[in-house]
């Protein structure tokens, strides 16, 4: 399975009011292994960021002035995402912005270009109901080092999200392993049943004196703890 962790930075909070995407960061994972394959774009939004947004991401108008527009990277970006499940923290926010960027180009909404979108914030709320589930809070709870996160950056946040997601879903690995073992055990049992073991010698390993003494000591402790209510002594032949 191919999955991509995605994050964006924007000029503000409302694409309906004209705010634009200024940064996109993506991290690829295949079969729960990070591949090192990434996509990272700084974008010229053709407008200024709000003062509040600038404090969050720190990307000035001057820095973004010579960067490509979303229209210039859209085809390459969407082609790279094709067929992947995209995982986003608070997905409604990012996909709303991407939908508006695509609408400007006369393109279909973001979800139509990928295999699916999964919201890690909704996952976290199910796992940790009633708790703070921001990316920073999850990093602290799941012991993901985010000490380098002084400002929000799309690629760094995508990397942190990947680490958080892997920890939130590690139980799935255990489930898959257990299912695999159960399947293997079933197949092994069928194969064993078809073998004729009658001619094989049965090896009996007798305990030595030290092992017998240790066994007796444990039985005596159980006798004492149960106030003489153990029954196995009655089964020992006289």
Image (cartoon, rainbow, N blue to C red):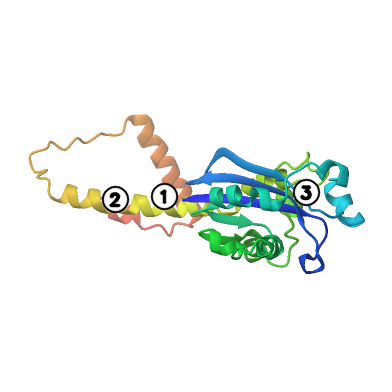
Q: Earlier in the sequence, mark 3 or mark 2?
A: 3
The Cα–Cα distance between marks 1 and 3, rounded to whole angstroms, is 46 Å
Image coordinates of residue 195 in percent, x first then y, are 12, 45
- Label 2's element? helix
The answer to whether 111 is drawn above or below residue 165 in the figure is below
Disc 3: which residue: 44
Image coordinates of residue 209 in percent, x first then y, are 34, 30
Image coordinates of residue 24 in percent, x first then y, are 69, 49
Drawn side of residue 18 relative to residue 26, left or right: right
Disc 2: which residue: 185
Q: Residue at x 44, y 41 (%)?
A: 217
Image coordinates of residue 203 in percent, x first then y, are 19, 35
Farthest left residue in view: 199
Pointers 2 and 1 in contact (C-beta within 8 Å): no
Disc 1: which residue: 177
- Label 1's element? helix
Drawn side of residue 183 relative to residue 26, left or right: left
The Cα–Cα distance between marks 2 and 1, rounded to whole angstroms, is 12 Å
């Amino acid at each position: 399975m191919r999955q991509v962790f995605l994050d964006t930075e924007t000029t503000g909070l409302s694409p309906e009011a004209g705010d634009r995407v200024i940064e996109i960061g993506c991290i690829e994972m295949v079969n729960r292994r990070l591949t090192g394959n990434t996509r990272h774009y700084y974008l010229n939004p053709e407008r200024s960021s709000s003062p509040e947004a600038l404090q969050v991401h720190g990307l000035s108008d001057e820095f973004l002035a010579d960067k490509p527009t979303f229209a210039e990277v859209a085809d390459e970006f969407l082609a790279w995402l094709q067929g992947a499940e995209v995982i986003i923290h608070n997905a409604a926010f990012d996909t709303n912005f991407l939908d508006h960027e695509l609408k400007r180009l006369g393109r279909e909404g973001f979800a139509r270009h990928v295999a699916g979108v999964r919201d890690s914030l909704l996952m976290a709320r199910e796992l940790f109901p009633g708790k703070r589930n921001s990316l920073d809070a999850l990093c602290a709870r799941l012991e993901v080092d985010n000490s380098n996160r002084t400002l929000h950056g799309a690629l760094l946040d995508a990397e942190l999200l990947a680490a958080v997601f892997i920890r939130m879903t590690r139980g799935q690995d255990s489930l898959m392993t257990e299912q695999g073992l159960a399947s293997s055990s079933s197949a092994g049992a069928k194969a064993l049943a078809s073998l004729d073991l009658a001619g094989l010698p049965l090896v009996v390993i007798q305990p030595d004196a030290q092992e017998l003494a240790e066994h007796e000591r444990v039985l005596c402790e159980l006798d004492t703890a149960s106030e003489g209510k153990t029954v196995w002594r009655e089964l020992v032949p006289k």
